[in-house]
Image: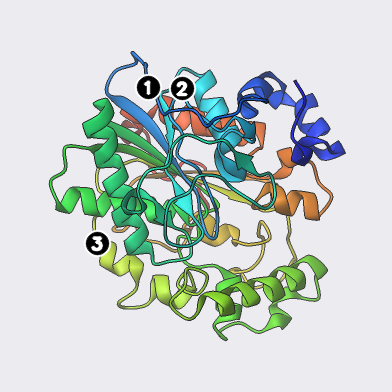
């Protein structure tokens, strides 16, 4: 079966040669079909499911355990490898629809596109990845309620990449506050800016570019991020994940209160880039999110009661891996070690609260 153009590179060949080789059939679902598949779920795995949530400025089509995109990557460039890995381990996996703007998502463009995807869900169930965390969380909670009503899903393990982890946390609070029939069993986040991200601090004028310490990729990312933030406006997603917006007295973390009480959280962060003596909020980082933020190092147990941490030498996305001439397996969403860690977090979610807190996590 021929691969889409986005996979015809030495980087993807390195990926296929690595541990993800066994998943290639699931990463690219098929070619040549003239129509998008109708969403279906003939799973007999019970009422529990894993739901994948993508982050800032991403597009992710709605997929079910048995329906995905026919052309290109099966579920967009953020969560395709996660979906394949979790499905291969026997999980019932859905991807939350996400669009980089308001409205439905029927296909994706840009790096690693997807097309002929399952029939899209309404905008009310689709996360606007350029909008507010609370609005994204509300739409995600509506999607989870849909899964309950349509497929009998009562319990979910949420896996969020980047800002997707914040959307997931917001949805958890919404579900709890509404006494929903859907219970969140666990949350796993990959490079989520729990306490803010330094490119947003730069874009909002709170961090000088000298914090890059003349590291070229850092300067490149900050410059590009500021353009994204300017295009979205001051209330856009790129600006509202600054340290001040998340950590201020009336910021997102303060408003979330005890939303994560009773829910084990696994935090996975990347430290591909580092500079000795650099600001801890910036260095080390995965090119977008500082490791300190991804591991919620300064967030107290009152806000994040039970956590475990994993650190990998990864960058934030496969697009950045390509930009920096790395293999896709150097991206946190495609790293085989990360995929195993996510599977382990889901597999052990039922007993995780019995384990010691802060395993693998740095001291605050």
Residue 257, label in figure = 3
In 3D space, how far apart are the residues under numbered discs 2 and 1 (Cα atoms)?
6 Å
List the residue tagged with mark 2. Answer: 66
- The numbered mark, 2 or 3, whose residue comes first in the sequence reads 2
180 in relation to 27, above or below? below
Q: Position of residue 69 (x, y in %)?
A: 56, 33
Front-lying residue, 120 or 209: 120
In 3D space, how far apart are the residues under numbered discs 3 and 1 (Cα atoms)?
35 Å
Q: How is the image coloured?
A: rainbow
Q: Is label 3 or label 1 in front?
A: 1
Q: Residue at x 33, y 55 (%)?
A: 137
In the rendered view, does 231 fall on the left or right side of 66?
A: right
Q: Is label 2 or label 3 in front?
A: 2
Would you say residue 304 is visible in this rendering? no
Q: Residue at x 82, y 69 (%)?
A: 216
Using a 10 Å C-alpha cutoff, classify the residue at mark 3 as few (fewer than 14 neighbours), some (14 to 19) or many (20 or more). few
Front-lying residue, 63 or 345: 63
Q: Position of residue 33 (x, y in %)?
A: 61, 25
Residue placed farthest to the right in the image?
A: 10
């Amino acid at each position: 079966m021929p691969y889409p153009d986005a996979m015809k590179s030495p980087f993807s060949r390195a990926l296929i040669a690595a541990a993800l080789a066994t998943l290639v059939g699931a990463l690219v679902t098929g070619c040549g079909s003239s129509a998008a598949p109708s969403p279906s779920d003939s799973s007999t795995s019970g009422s529990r499911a894993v739901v994948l949530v993508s982050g800032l400025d991403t597009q992710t089509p709605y997929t079910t355990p048995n329906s995905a995109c026919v052309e290109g990557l099966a579920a967009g460039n953020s969560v395709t490898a996660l979906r394949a890995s979790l499905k291969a381990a026997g999980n019932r996996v859905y991807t939350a629809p996400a669009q980089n703007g308001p409205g439905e998502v029927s296909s994706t463009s840009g790096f690693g596109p997807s097309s002929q995807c399952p029939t899209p869900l309404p905008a009310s169930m689709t996360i606007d990845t350029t909008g507010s965390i609370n609005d994204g969380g509300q739409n995600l909670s509506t999607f989870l309620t849909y899964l309950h009503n349509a497929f009998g899903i009562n319990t979910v393990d949420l896996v969020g990449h980047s800002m997707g982890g914040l959307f997931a946390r917001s949805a958890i609070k919404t579900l709890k506050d509404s006494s929903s029939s859907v219970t969140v069993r666990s949350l796993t986040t990959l490079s989520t800016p729990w306490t803010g991200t330094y490119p947003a601090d730069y874009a909002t004028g709170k961090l000088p570019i000298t914090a890059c310490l003349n590291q070229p990729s850092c300067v490149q990312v900050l410059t590009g991020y500021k353009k994204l933030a300017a295009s979205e406006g001051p209330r856009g997603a790129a600006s509202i994940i600054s340290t001040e917006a998340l950590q201020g007295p009336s910021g997102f973390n303060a408003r979330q209160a005890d939303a994560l009480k009773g829910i084990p959280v696994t935090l996975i962060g990347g430290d591909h880039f580092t500079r000795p003596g650099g600001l801890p909020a910036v260095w080390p980082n995965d090119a977008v999110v500082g490791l300190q933020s991804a591991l919620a190092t300064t967030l107290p147990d009152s806000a994040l009661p039970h956590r475990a941490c994993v650190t990998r030498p990864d960058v934030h996305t496969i697009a950045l891996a390509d930009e920096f001439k790395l293999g896709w397996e150097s991206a946190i969403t495609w790293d085989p070690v990360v995929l195993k860690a996510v599977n382990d977090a889901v597999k052990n979610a039922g007993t995780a609260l019995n384990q010691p807190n802060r395993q693998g996590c740095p001291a605050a």
